[in-house]
Image (cartoon, rainbow, N blue to C red):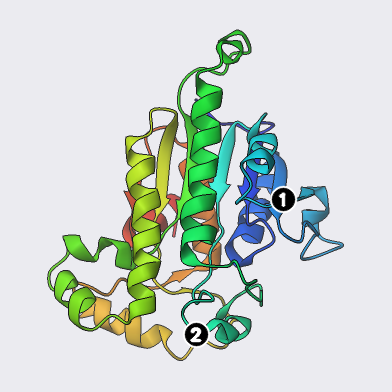
Amino acid sequence: MALAPASKVTVFGGTGYVGSQVCERLVQKGYQVTGVSRRGTNPRPNTILDQVNWVVGDATNPQNVQAAVQDADAVVHAMGLLFDVESGLQGFNTIVSGSKSIPSEASTYDNITRKTAMNILDALEQQAKNPLNMLQGKSGKLPMAFVSCAESGWPNVQYGDFVEDNLAPAWLKKYLVAKRAVEDRMMTSTAIRPVIVRPSLIWSWDKLDVLPIIPVFNLANAVGVPFVDKTVRVETLADAIVAGLEQDEVYGVQRFQAMEELAGV
C-alpha cells in the first residue's frame, strides 16, 4: 500500500520520546495522525502536535487496539521502556526515559513490548481478511514500523552471542526476548510490510543523561567493535520511520546506516 499525505497513521506511544517526534513529522507532511497512549494528552501543547488526534488507549487491550487501527493506513509501534518493573531498576526510567514516564505495576517487557505489538498485528491481520477492505481500495500490505534495538541483532554479528550470553544482565536478556518476538512475528505476517528500526542509544541535545556516553558508543563503532552500533539522534530516527512508511521498497530490519540514509543524514 503506497502511503502518501492525507493518509491516516496511528502511532502507539505517541506521547513518548520517539513517538511524539514521529507524530510531529507526520503532521508536518500532511498526514492525519492519531496518537494512542495511556495518558492520551498532548506532550507539547501549543505546538504542531495540537493537530494530532490524541486518544487514551491501553494497547494491552485488544478492543482498544482494534478501535485505534480500524481506519489506519499505517501504524507505528513506539512503545517501550528500558527498565521494567521486574528489573528492579524501574525508578531510573524517570532519568533515562525521554518522556520521564513512570512504569505501572503491569509494565513488564512482555506486556509493553510483546503483548501490545501482538495485539496490533492480530488486529491488522484480522482487518486484512475483511472483504470490505478490497471494496474500499485497501489492498496490499499495510506498513507497520516497530522501534526495536540494535542489540536484537547481536546473534548476527561477531562476538554478539558471547556478549549476550556472558556479559548482558538478566533484565537486558528479557528485554531482547520481547523485542525479538515482535520482530519474528512481523517478518512472518502476511498483512503488513514490516519496517523494523534497530537504533542503539537514542539521543538529543536536551537529553543530558546519555550525552556523556554517546562518544564512547560512536568511537567503539568507528574502530570496528562489531557488537556496538553508532548512536542515533531521535530526529534521525523519527525521519527514518516516516520515510520507511512512505517508501514501499523499505522492508525488514534497518540498522543505523539505513536509518541515516532514509533520514537523508
Q: Quadrant of residue 226?
A: bottom left
Judge left or right: residue 33 versus residue 108.
Answer: right
Q: Position of residue 168 (x, y in %)?
A: 28, 80
Mark closest to the chain's N terminus, 2 or 1: 1
Residue to which mark 1 is pinned: 57
Judge left or right: residue 191 versus residue 155.
Answer: right
Q: Residues within 10 Å of mark 2 (few under 14, many from 20)?
A: few
Q: Residue extending furthest bottom? A: 212
- Mark 1: which secondary structure? loop
Q: Residue extending furthest top? A: 135
8, above or below 26, in the image = above
Taking the spot 70% from the left edge, 50% from the top edge, the residue there is 35
Taking the spot 79% from the left edge, 65% from the top edge, the residue there is 44
Q: Position of residue 244 (x, y in %)?
A: 46, 44
Rounded to the nearest whole Å, what is the CA distance between mark 2 and mark 1? 26 Å
If the image is split into quadrants, where does the C terminus sit?
A: bottom left
Asked whether 162 or 200 is in front, the reply is 162
Label drawn at residue 88: 2
- The answer to whether residue 224 of the structure is visible from this angle is no
